[in-house]
Image (cartoon, grey):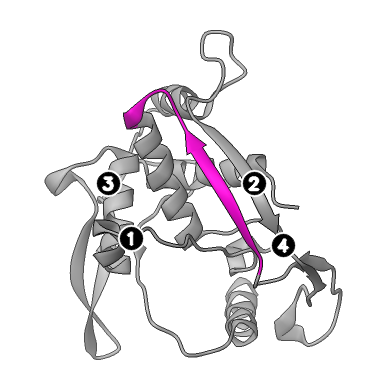
């Protein structure tokens, strides 16, 4: 089932990963101001998500495709669609929410093994100026909007030598501060011709080898 709390939870994770706030109390306060908090002086989230028009068929897929066997629990099929509404009384808060959703959809996922590309979804549209932006430009714009970083203090696109070629990489601000939460250091995009199952299998192999 596609539920707004699951989407908001993913958004909260990626919002935090994009920040460069070193003071934990300041980070907690800012996060609460956007996503809400149980503390009495903060209250509810400053924006609202609503999932509607669900057309989400369910099929069984292998949980560990790189092993070729194991559990195959029911999951949402890749051809499903749904409509998500974002609303807020504060236009700037709505902009933060929309850009955070963009980042969480591109870099993250929902449900089990979302860190290994399972549960991925993408946003259709919009037309107009956003539709003319490259994927790197969309990610860069969204990261800087949701983090509040600007100019030389913000995220930027940098040409880096990788495997004998120069590739554009989205690089995050350098920090030496210790944090107890994940941070986005860099993002590299690449056009792939493999099928969904092939991609999940390759990611499973790579992460299994790395973790072992």
Residue 164 lies left or right of residue 118; in this view the side is left
- Determine whether the residue tagged by mark 4 lies in a helix, strand or loop: loop
Residue occupying image coordinates x 18% and y 44%: 153
- Residue marked by disc 2: 52
Instruction: For marks 3 and 4, give the CA distance.
Output: 32 Å
Q: Is residue 69 left or right of residue 194?
A: right
**Horizontal and vertical percent position of residue 105:** 50, 57
Q: CA distance from mark 4 to mark 1?
A: 24 Å
Seen in the image, is 119 located left or right of residue 149?
right
For the residues marked 2 and 1, what is the alpha-carbon distance in whole angstroms?
Answer: 21 Å
Q: Which mark is residue 185?
A: none
> Of the residues under marks 3 and 4, which one precedes in the sequence?
4
**In which quadrant of the rendered view does residue 162 lie?**
bottom left
Residue 33 lies, in percent from the top left, at 45, 22
Q: How far apart, in angstroms, are the residues tagged by discs 4 and 2?
A: 11 Å
Residue interval drawn in magenta: 80-92
User: Which of label 1 and label 3 is nearer to you?
Assistant: 1
Residue 186 highlighted magenta (yes or no): no
Front of the two marks 2 and 3: 2
Q: Position of residue 177 (x, y in %)?
A: 34, 41
- Which numbered mark, 4 or 1, is in the foreground of this view? 1
Secondary structure type for disc 1 = loop
Residue annotated with mark 4: 56
Q: Does residue 123 lie above or below 37 as drawn?
A: below
Q: Residues within 10 Å of mark 1 (few under 14, many from 20)?
A: few
Tell me: residue 128, above or below residue 100: below
| Magenta region includes residue 91 | yes
- Residue located beneath label 3 in the image: 144
Q: Nearer the viewer, residue 153 or 117?
A: 117
């Amino acid at each position: 089932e596609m539920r707004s709390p699951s989407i908001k939870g993913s958004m909260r994770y990626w919002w935090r990963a994009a920040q460069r706030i070193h003071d934990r109390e300041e980070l907690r306060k800012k996060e609460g101001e956007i996503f809400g908090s149980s503390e009495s002086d903060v209250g509810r989230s400053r924006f609202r998500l609503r999932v509607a028009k669900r057309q989400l068929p369910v099929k069984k897929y292998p949980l560990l495709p790189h092993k070729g066997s194991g559990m195959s629990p029911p999951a949402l099929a890749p051809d499903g669609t749904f409509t998500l509404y974002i609303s807020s009384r504060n236009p700037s808060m709505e902009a933060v929410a929309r850009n955070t959703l963009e980042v969480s959809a591109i870099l993250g996922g929902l449900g089990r093994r979302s860190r290994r590309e399972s549960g991925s979804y993408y946003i259709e549209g919009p037309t107009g100026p956003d539709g003319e932006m490259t994927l790197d430009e969309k990610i860069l714009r969204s990261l800087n909007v949701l983090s509040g970083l600007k100019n030389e203090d913000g995220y930027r696109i940098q040409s880096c030598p990788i495997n004998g070629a120069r590739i554009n990489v989205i690089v995050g601000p350098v920090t030496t501060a210790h944090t107890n939460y994940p941070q986005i250091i860099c993002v590299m995009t690449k056009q792939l011709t493999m099928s969904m199952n092939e991609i999940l299998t390759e990611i499973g192999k790579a992460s299994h080898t790395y973790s072992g």
